[in-house]
Amino acid sequence: MFKKMFSVLFVLFLLTGGCDQGQKQNISGDKIRSFANELYNRYLFKQAIEQYQFYLTHYPVDENEQANITFRIGNIYYEKLHDYESALAQFLKIRSIYPESKIVKDADKKVVACLERLQRSADAEQALKESADLEPPKRENKPGEVVAKIGDRKITQGDLDYKIKQLPPEIQLQYKDKSKKLEFLRRYVATELMYDSAKRQGLDNDKDVIENVFQAKKTFMVQKLLEREISKKVKITPDDIELYYKANPDKYAEKDKDGKVIRQPALSDIQSQVAQDLMRERQQKAYNELMASYLRAENVKIYDDLVK
């Protein structure tokens, strides 16, 4: 394992610092492409894109392969990073620079999908008109045995593992054994089937769906804002944890039924709990300060006495 990781790091060193871009590359193009694939398979998607682009820039590659790798880069942006603007740029590149490529139709479908994700419905409709084939875009599979099929579409073990990895860590633990993974897979397939059926019935244009999508987007945007703003203000150190523990001894004391302290646990025994309590308290304080600043900035007035 160490030798494999060392070889990956060594190749990365040669690519980033150990070779002059103006000189002929000492590493074969096949190795660069394999290295990019290795990064992709280890979920290092941004680094994989960098190496695919390095390969396209520094090695003689025929137009067919250029188009295929550009499509792969676009798929990584779309499927894995959810960066739909960058994905759109890659798929448009295929249409413009490689119009004779066999994957132009697939790129056209992906252009439509990107525009839909970006909520540019008018542009998406125009792109649909420009495309002769309106089948849903193919999805790029991760490596592994095929564990399910939906028509001609394959779901691999890699796809299943990747979906589970997107869950919160505490939820992932529920899907360690085979029976639970099968349960997750069946639910995943059922969701895909119902989603396909809903799209065929035009429910993506239903007014309630559109409103709920907007509300969900607003909620996620607010969560993202809070994460960004509060994380900048809330930092805790081991010294902070120790001071908080000493300032709140009663909070962590073990008591009998009459409220009498029978034991004061050592900080080392409950450090994780103390850290969580301190973090939660500081996050709440940072949230209150952030809200107060917004209220002042926008001159907000809330008439409590008029609420019935």
Image (tube, grey):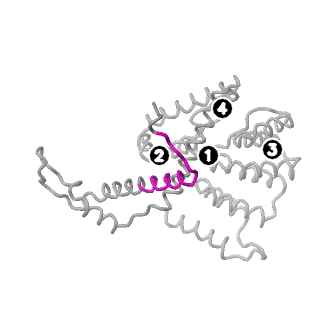
Of 206 and 71, nearer the camera is 206
Q: CA distance from mark 2 to mark 1?
A: 21 Å
Residue matched to label 1: 142
Structural distance between the alpha carbons of marks 4 and 1: 31 Å
What span is colored magenta in the figure? 285-303
- Give residue 168's mark: 2
Mark 1 residue element: loop
Residue 14 rendering spot, x and y as whole percentages: 65, 73
Q: Nearer the viewer, residue 126 or 11?
A: 126
Q: Which residue is mark 3?
A: 103
Label 4 secondary element: helix
Disc on the earlier residue, 4 or 1: 1
Q: Are marks 2 and 1 in contact (CB under 8 Å)?
A: no
Label 3 residue SS: loop
> What type is the residue that disc 1 sits on?
Lys
Sort mark 1 into few (<14), some (14-19) or many (20+) by Cα contacts within 10 Å: some
Mark in front: 3 vs 2 = 2
Instruction: Pick whichever of labels 3 and 1 is earlier in the sequence.
Output: 3
Query: Which one is in front in this view, the residue at disc 2 or the one at disc 1?
Result: 2
Q: At 54% across and 69% down in the image, what residue appears?
A: 6
| Among numbered discs 3 and 2, the one appearing first in the sequence | 3
Earlier along the polypeptide chain: callout 3 or callout 4?
Answer: 3
Q: Does residue 94 appear to the left or right of 47 in the view shown? A: right
From what the image shows, is residue 63 above or below residue 147? below
Residue 182 position in % (x across, y down): 48, 33
Q: Main secondary structure of the magenta part?
A: helix
How many angstroms separate mark 3 from mark 4 (CA)?
32 Å
